[in-house]
Image: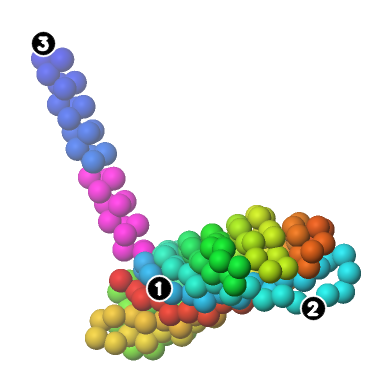
């Protein structure tokens, strides 16, 4: 009887310890997050890969949500981290079609000043990073008929202003090399190359 009671006490203590550890780990992870939400205008430039053709630009207005996860930092002033994002954009073509894309940019970034960690209170911040933008685009209108998944190696640069406790960040992201895909471009079914350039405002919270 005493042994069973002892075992129950041990199980209870272990359960409390695991619960406390999970709570502490969750708090530590939350402390490392700098979430953001905002608007991006993304310009996708397409050109035929089989022969020389003029680039064809496609513009999308997008909602962006993501977070910066601090991997390492020094005095909450300088940090290195991961910045995954999810962007959903729409384009309304002249033919009446509603075109869309879903993008998942992820960057390894360095930050200085504002936004470097969730505890930084400086007024100005800078950031830059390298990574990948994976996109799925569905577009039908004019000379373009494409449904394709592709990825571009990319870079991002940003500047942040901390005003009254609210972080406002101007962000520029751009592909470093074209991605290849297939589709109907300029009334020719074949291969294409696409590049990405995006600008936007995102808000930290």
Compared across the picture, whether 189 is left or right of 159 comes to right
Q: How crowded is mark 2: few (under 14 residues within 10 Å), some or many (20 or more)?
A: few
Question: Residue 31 appears in which quarter of the rendering?
Answer: bottom left
| Image mark for residue 1 | 3
- The residue to which callout 1 is attached is 38
Magenta part of the chain = 20-33
The residue lying toward the viewer, choosing from 124 and 59, is 59
Determine the secondary structure under disc 3: loop
Residue at mark 3 to residue at mark 1: CA–CA distance: 62 Å
Mark on residue 162?
A: none
Between 172 and 63, the residue placed more toward the observer is 63
Name the residue at 68% across, 59% down. Answer: 146
Residue 180 x, y percent position in the rendering: 76, 61
For the residue carrying disc 1, how many other residues have a C-alpha within 10 Å: few (<14), some (14-19), or many (20+)? Answer: some
Closer-to-camera residue (165/147) = 147
Look at 53% across and 80% down and name the residue there. Answer: 199
Disc 3 crowd, CA 10 A, few/some/many (<14, 14-19, 20+): few
For the C terminus, which image quadrant?
Answer: bottom left
Circle 2 sits on which residue? 54
């Amino acid at each position: 009887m005493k042994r069973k009671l002892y075992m129950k006490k041990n199980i209870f203590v272990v359960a409390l310890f695991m619960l406390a550890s999970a709570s502490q780990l969750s708090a530590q992870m939350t402390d490392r997050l700098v979430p953001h939400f905002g608007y991006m205008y993304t310009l996708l430039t397409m050109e035929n890969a089989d022969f020389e053709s003029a680039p064809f630009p496609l513009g999308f207005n997008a909602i962006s949500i993501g977070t910066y996860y601090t991997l390492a930092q020094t005095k909450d002033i300088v940090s290195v981290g991961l910045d995954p994002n999810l962007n959903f954009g729409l384009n309304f073509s002249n033919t009446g079609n509603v075109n869309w894309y879903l993008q998942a940019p992820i960057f390894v970034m360095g930050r200085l000043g504002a936004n470097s960690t969730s505890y930084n209170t400086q007024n100005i911040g800078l950031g830059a990073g390298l990574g990948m933008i994976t996109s799925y685009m569905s577009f039908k209108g004019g000379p373009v008929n494409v449904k394709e998944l592709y990825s571009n190696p990319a870079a991002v640069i940003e500047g942040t202003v901390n005003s009254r406790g609210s972080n406002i960040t101007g962000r520029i992201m751009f592909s470093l090399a074209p991605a290849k895909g297939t589709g109907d471009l300029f009334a020719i079914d074949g291969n294409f190359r696409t590049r990405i350039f995006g600008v936007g405002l995102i808000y930290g919270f």
